[in-house]
Amino acid sequence: VTSIGGYSFAYCSSLKTVTFASGNLLDSIGNYAFQQTGLTTISLPASVTTIGTYAFKFCNSLKTVTFASGSLLGSIGNSAFQQSGLTTISLPANVTSMGTYAFFGCSALTNVTFASGSTLESIGNYAFQQSGLTTISLPASVTSMRIQAFQYCSSLKTVTFASGSTLGSISQSAFYESGLTTISLPANVTSMG
């Protein structure tokens, strides 16, 4: 199996577990593939490079997503985990893009970490809006923070930037009505929406 097509398991509310055989060569998870299923956890093979739009949207019972060592995941699609039950997630180093609404409305999501050597370039529009984040440390590779990325994150008290941060722009309403108490902006920031 190299790909899981769009809507393959969508709305399978009784589907709690998906496992992948050792040596699996799965490359992509299609749009809506697991939307609104009963998954509680899933461990994705290192071979997966893309997670499609709405892939795990409305998976209210999904608490944990893990990525195999050496993960090749490069992109997380729009609304991939929107309003899921995620509590924590550690994103692989190869992820360069995070789509619009990627983790929108994940009210139980308190912790997001980035693997050492992260190549993430941008935080998408509304990516973490209305999430439960309390703190986040952004990798030096992030160059832009898009519209309303952390809007309404009322529990978000601290945002830190890695040494050598290349962040250049913070877009409109990025932290609107968040719980921030203090922030130190990197030297490369030239525009703020």
Image: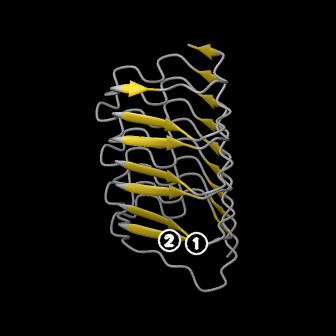
SS assignment at label 1? loop
Vertical order, 165 against 82 (above or below): above
Question: Image point 49% across, 66% down: which residue?
Answer: 66
In the rendering, at what x and y percent does residue 155 appear? Answer: 29, 35
Q: Nearer the viewer, residue 33 or 94?
A: 94
Question: Image point 59% across, 44% down: which residue?
Answer: 139
In the rendering, at what x and y percent does residue 132 appear? Answer: 32, 41
> Identity of the amino acid at label 2?
Ser
> Identity of the amino acid at label 1?
Ala
In the rendering, at what x and y percent does residue 1 appear? Answer: 67, 76
SS assignment at label 2? strand
Residue 134 picture quarter: top left
In the rendering, at what x and y percent does residue 40 appear? Answer: 35, 66
Q: What residue does disc 1 label? A: 68
Left/right placement of residue 10 relative to residue 53 reads left
Vertical order, 77 against 154 (above or below): below
For the residues labelled 2 and 1, say whether their Cβ atoms are less than 8 Å apart.
yes
Q: Residues within 10 Å of mark 2 (few under 14, many from 20)?
A: some
Vertical order, 103 against 180 (above or below): below
Q: Nearer the viewer, residue 127 or 142?
A: 142
Among the two numbered marks 2 and 1 on one chain, the one whose residue lies closer to the N terminus = 2
Q: Look at the image and tell me in which quarter the C terminus lies.
A: top right
> Tag on residue 43?
2
Q: Nearer the viewer, residue 187 or 101?
A: 187
Question: Image point 39% across, 50% down: which residue?
Answer: 111
Q: Nearer the viewer, residue 167 or 97?
A: 167
Which is in the foreground here, disc 2 or disc 1? Answer: 1
Residue 100 picture quarter: top right
How far is disc 2 from disc 1 in space, using C-alphas?
7 Å
Report the number of numbered marks. Answer: 2
